[in-house]
Image: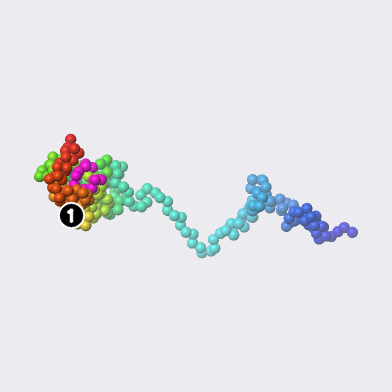
Amino acid sequence: MPPRRSERIRARRNTVAAAGNTPPTHSNRRSRARRNSTPYGGTPPAGGSRRRSSRRGAGRGRRRNSLPAGAVVPAPEPTAQRGATGSIRITHSNLRLWQEGHPAGAERTSESEQICIRRLRKDLSEIAMNPMEGYEVEVVDDNLLHWMATIPGPADSPYAGGRFKLDLLFTTQFPFSPPYIKFSTRIFHCNIATNGYVCLNILRSEWSPALSVSKLLLSIVCLLGDPNPKDPLEAEVALLYISNRAQHDRVARAWTDQYAKP
């Protein structure tokens, strides 16, 4: 009498166990081959998970990984794009748009930037319509936020006859915040640092939006003629100004002749 099917299966499992292999979960060879196959026809990597290439297996995987009903999918993070922040720098490439009143340029600027642009253009027009002797102003590389100015030394000071160049850097918060001003020409002055930065009250706590660029330049010229040694940036220069005014003026005049005159 032939052995029963259960006895044949038990005998096959005992044979495989004796060889050190894991018994298959199915006896059907086609199912076993389909389960061990890979999408590219090779064998799955040792110790790795088996990938199902059949549509039925892939469908079950998608159903297990799908979101529950009613779940909200979060939106992806926005990517950095030109103009995405609503603020762009005023440079040569877009200055003409604002000068010509192009609608695309107006859309790209914030309200504070538009106020800054209008005010800077107004101050430029004021200087052009009412030129002051010895004063020069120009926009650097078509950048409306960067100006180069030239001021004269006061006649009754050791800086007389000198021509001093200044860098003016504006922010888009102008005129509600003061510009950054730096002397490009070396000068011996207790309120002007060796790196060129200016110590002036209207550039700090006493700034007012009503101050135009032309008035600001006049204030700096007045500072040259009337230093404030009580609030210095260069303590040694201030001490020399208080203790030996004649020596201070000789050094300041020598610096003017060397650096501020052609």
**Residue projecting furthest to the top:** 262
Q: Is residue 149 left or right of residue 49?
A: left
The residue sitting at 15% across, 50% down in the picture is: 243
Pick the front one: 62 or 175? 175
Magenta span main SS? loop
Q: Is residue 44 left or right of residue 156?
A: right
- Where residue 91 sits in the image (x, y, percent)? 29, 44
Query: Where does label 1 land, which residue?
Result: 230
Q: Secondary structure at mark 1?
A: loop
- Where residue 198 sits in the image (x, y, percent)? 22, 49
Please identify the quadrant where the C terminus is shown. Answer: top left
The residue sitting at 62% across, 57% down in the picture is: 60
Residue 176: quarter of image: bottom left
Q: Is residue 75 left or right of residue 63?
A: left
Determine if residue 178 is in view.
Answer: yes
Q: Is residue 197 left or right of residue 56?
A: left
**Residue projecting furthest to the front:** 243
The residue sitting at 73% across, 51% down in the picture is: 30
Pick the front one: 62 or 25? 25
**Residue projecting furthest to the right:** 1
Q: How many marks?
A: 1
- Where residue 59 sits in the image (x, y, percent)? 61, 56
Q: Which residues are magenta?
A: 184-196
**Residue projecting furthest to the bottom:** 70
Q: Amino acid at mark 1?
A: Lys
Please tell me whether residue 40 belongs to the stretch shown in magenta: no
Pick the front one: 19 or 184? 184
Please tell me whether residue 193 belongs to the stretch shown in magenta: yes
Question: How dense is the environment of label 1, judged by Cα within 10 Å: few (below 14), some, or many (20 and up)?
Answer: few
The residue sitting at 30% across, 53% down in the picture is: 110
Pick the front one: 131 or 185? 185
